[in-house]
Amino acid sequence: MISFNYETEFSWNEEDKISSWVSNVIISEGFKVGDINYIFCDDDYLHKINVEFLNHDTLTDIISFDYSVGKILQGDIFISIERVKENASDFKVSFLDELHRVLVHGVLHYCGYKDKTDEDAKIMRQKEDHYTALLGR
């Protein structure tokens, strides 16, 4: 089950559409949907998590904690709405396009995709582009 939690003023009415889309991404990648929690928050909230759990004193748009067991994907995906807004402006894309990219990015990590090397980041971006294009249909 995919759930959406709000620790900031942000909210939206696309939960059913996004839940179905994320489920289809997971199934397309050969996995099963477990409990995935999206937590939308602000920079301060996510920064505290980044420092406390990852020892990184930086701002980020997303942190995902993977609790998957075998082929059942589950975990908590924290997303800073402030970072997504700023990144959308920086990348000259719409807020929703950037939010969709970040939503699928977290799940793709659960599927085993990495983004630390240039080659891994290229593959991750291709997967993000592929799946976000499917959402628009």
Image: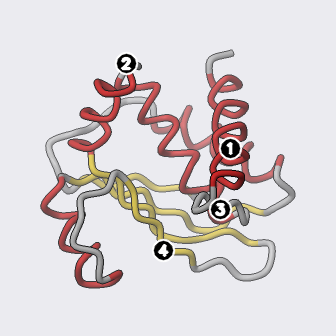
Amino acid at dot 2? Lys
Evaluate if marks 2 and 1 touch, with contact meaning CB atoms under 8 Å apart.
no
Residue that badge 2 annotates? 92
Name the N-terminal-most of marks 3 and 2. Answer: 2
The label nearer to you, 4 versus 3, is 3
Residue at screen point 35% across, 81% down: 54
Left or right? Give the position of 120 relative to 54.
right
Tell me the quarter of the image containing the N terminus. bottom right
Residue that badge 4 annotates? 65
Image x and y of residue 67, in percent: 58, 80
Residue that badge 3 annotates? 114
Image x and y of residue 101, in percent: 52, 37
Name the N-terminal-most of marks 3 and 1. Answer: 3
Q: Residues within 10 Å of mark 2 (few under 14, many from 20)?
A: few
Compared with 97, 125 (above or below) is below
Image x and y of residue 120, in percent: 69, 55
Residue at screen point 35% across, 53% down: 79
Residue that badge 1 annotates? 122
The label nearer to you, 1 versus 4, is 1
Residue at screen point 34% across, 58% down: 39
Give the structural element (helix, strand or loop) at label 4: strand
Alpha-carbon span between mark 1 and mark 4: 22 Å
Q: Residues within 10 Å of mark 1 (few under 14, many from 20)?
A: some
Alpha-carbon span between mark 2 and mark 4: 28 Å
Amino acid at dot 4? Phe
Give the structural element (helix, strand or loop) at label 3: loop
Alpha-carbon span between mark 3 and mark 2: 24 Å
Q: Work out whether residue 60 or residue 21 is closer to the camera in this orientation and state it.
A: 60
Amino acid at dot 1? Lys
